Amino acid sequence: MRANCILKVLSVTLVAGTSFSPAYTRESKQPNIVIVQTDELSFRTLGAYRKTLSKEQAEMWGPGNVVKTPNIDALAANGILCTEFYTNCPQSAPSRACFLTGLYSMNNGVIVNGIDLEENRETFAHILAANGYATGYAGKWHLANKAILPGWAPQPDMGFEDNKYMYNNGHWKKMVDTPEGPSVAVKDEKGRPSVAVDNADKESYATDFFMTKTIDFIKKHKDGPFCFMLSIADPHGPNTVREPYASMYQDMEFQKPRTWTGSNKGKRTIDNKGLANYFGMVKCIDDNMGRLVKSLKEQGLYDNTIIIFTADHGDMLGEHDRDDKGVPYEASLKIPFIIHCPALLPQGEICKNVMSNVDVKLTLLGLVGLAGKAKSDGNDYSKILLEAATGKSYSNVAFCRGPAMKKEDMRGFVCVVTDRYKLVCNPGGKISALYDRMADPDELKDFSAFPDYQDVVKKLMKQLKEYGNKYGDRRMADVQK
């Protein structure tokens, strides 16, 4: 199907806990896998997602104030664009722990930033490495050695056997190879690594530097199969980027988002320069996705490589008077998820099934016939992606929670998301809000007390209780209300 085709819609669901081994036969060898995970990426900054939104939702910062992302858009146009994909926790370490292990935060142990992912937690990389895949990782890890910065090649490698260019934490901007190994190129007056851009260029800027290492790994293992994960620490504060991206969007006159009220209440908000640089970071990422695709084509690997493009979580970018993440609004919880493999997957599809990070492990392994070897709290949605399957027996929900300082911490939100509704609760089952994203896409109105919505509230509360009890989320477990 050509890139300019009319995208078909997959709106399907799957019973929780099921696992599917695809009957899909292919003459080609086992597919390779490349995962590119960005950080605080607003889905509204990607052209492929803007096409699925109304103009007022797509151009949240004023008419015409958008980033053109042709390379990411091409992956969506020739792959599957998932429009209802959510992080299970809108903070980096908990989100990626769910992504890697297929377990909710309470069960993988990473409930907040700064907690190590324990060695006995099984990741999809463990399964792939045990079944003949060469595995590697480059970029921010955020799941070990929290006291050591940057923390190169953190251990355990959690199944990513080549992790020389994995570092534990930080949003460093300029990198360099040294005889001792990779290093942050800029130091402060005390000799400590610095986040300064310091004239970084297309070789040394972190996004470019780690994409080069990704391409190097692909070339080395082109006979496959391989799985490589690239974690790009952009976009993220301090919202700086190398030239020419730093200048590309500075002339835009950004408007406040539709949901801006000016109340602020002490929450920091991004300024015009910061938003322009944020756009620049997104553009740099898109250009590097073009580099990745070009290399795969040159190596003859493009058709048989599963490319996943996603993010840790979103960024409010001024919506609802705040930036950053950590809240249950769409701009924080909803994340991009594009999956592409011409030899394996349908092309030009939109998937509206609600999915989340805990579903990635089984789904990815299902696509390569290994889902039966893994444990997960999530679902195997490979059948949906492979065959555009439909059926009433499928679940269509995601469960999300705010980060917590300790497992017993009863502060923070917990919510259930469907393809239309989002019920947000405080611990103990006290309703905070019911959002109807069809009637109110800006999420400005709480429908939980409306008489016509009581059946919806009852159904979603039941699902939250079942989730809390089944998966051990104490915020909802044993709720009697």
Image (spheres, helix red, strand yellow):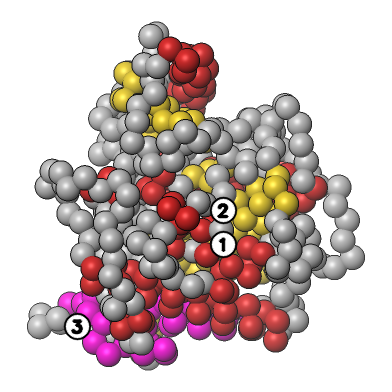
Please name the residue shown 49% across and 45% down the image: 86
The residue sitting at 70% across, 68% down in the picture is 4
Image height of 1 relative to 360, above or below: below
442 and 84: which one is in front?
442
Vertical placement of 232 versus 91: above or below? below
* Residue 344 appears left or right of 229: right
Question: Mark 1 or mark 3: which comes first in sequence?
Answer: 1
Q: Amino acid at mark 2?
A: Thr
Tag 3 or tag 2, which sits nearer the N-term?
A: 2
Residue type pointed to by label 3: Lys
Crowding near the residue tagged with mark 2, few <14, some 14–19, many ≥20 C-alpha atoms within 10 Å: some
* Residue occupied by mark 3: 187
Q: Which residues are magenta?
A: 192-218
Q: Which residue is mark 2?
A: 52
What whole-number distance in Å separates the C-alpha atoms at marks 2 and 3?
A: 43 Å
Residue 23 place in picture, x, y as percent: 86, 47
Asked if residue 216 is among those painted magenta in the image, a careful observer would answer: yes
Left or right: 304, with 424 as reference point: right
Alpha carbon of mark 1 to alpha carbon of mark 3: how far?
Answer: 38 Å
Q: Which class describes the residues within 10 Å of circle 1: few (<14), some (14-19), or many (20+)?
A: many
Amino acid under disc 1: Ala
